[in-house]
Amino acid sequence: MIRVDNLTKTFKAFEAVKGISFHVAPGEIFAFLGPNGAGKTTTIKMLTTILRPSSGTVMLDGLDPEHHKMAARKKFGIVFQDSSLDGEQTAYENMEMHGVLYHMPKKVRAERIERMLTTFELWDRRKDYVKKFSGGMKRRLEIARGLMHSPKILFLDEPTLGLDPQSRNQLWTHVKHLNETENTTIFLTTHHLDEADRVAHRIGIMDHGLLIAQGTSAELKEQTNTSTLEDAFLALTGSSLRDEDASSTDQLRDYAQIQGSIK
């Protein structure tokens, strides 16, 4: 479903992504991990057509985003770390707007909105303004919206950031259910390694622009002779602190760019 070959991205003299290659099978949950500044955000921006690769190729469900950008963008949904919901609209209105942007017929929109809001336990709150929602409810709504147009791929960038353990657990339960019932391919990033250990079928670890390891959680533990995914991660990447990733302003701009081009 996702195939990346020798992907690079250079900013002037700085090589942020250094010839990485990997694939994600249809219906797979793939966790893309790495310290801050490892190159994850740059990679995701290339996968989601926001940045153009310096070299190498990306294929999304058989489409090359560089040459078929509009068609490729309809293949995926994306949820950034920071909310891009309109707090002055209701949950239903946020979903409706997304469906309109993706040119979904009115009847299909209505059916899909009810299905997604019901699945994420928000149907009873569909008429409430989003600004009244808790953090966990907003994240569930964003994922429901990302799945609104029935994408084959869903990108989740730190979807549980700032959520309490109960909300995190509930969110992943819903995501796993959608993955199983709709065969949606999930590409996620998280700094909660227990989440990746629990939900991901396979894991890729990136550092200093390179994909330094990939495999199942069990394979990574065996490779590093460790007993937990966190210990395996630290064995591969070290324990030094790194710079922060993209700002919320950058992410909001990226979301607007994707949505604006669908029109």
Image (cartoon, rainbow, N blue to C red):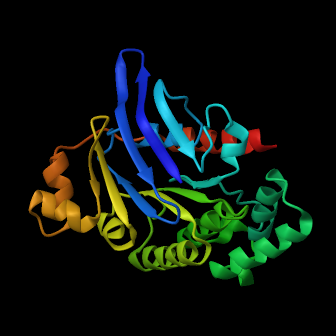
Residue positioned 35% across, 65% down in the render: 196
> In the current view of this chain or complex, which residue is farthest to the front?
62
Between 248 and 258, the one nearer to me in the picture: 258
Quarter-of-image position of residue 120: bottom right
Residue 229 seen in render: no
Judge left or right: residue 171 versus residue 197.
Answer: right
* Vertical side of 96 occupied by 80: above or below: above
Judge left or right: residue 210 versus residue 145.
Answer: left
Count all numbered tags in the image, as a single digit: 0
Residue positioned 59% across, 36% down in the render: 50
Residue positioned 69% across, 67% down in the render: 130
Residue 210: percent from left, percent from top: 29, 37
Residue 122: percent from left, percent from top: 67, 79
* Vertical side of 150 occupied by 54: above or below: above
* Vertical side of 23 occupied by 216: above or below: below
Residue positioned 55% across, 32% down in the render: 51
Residue 4 seen in render: yes
**Quarter of the image with the C terminus in it:** top right
**Quarter of the image with the N terminus in it:** bottom right
* Vertical side of 53 occupied by 186: above or below: below
Between 159 and 88, the one nearer to me in the picture: 159
Quarter-of-image position of residue 212: top left
Between 263 and 62, the one nearer to me in the picture: 62
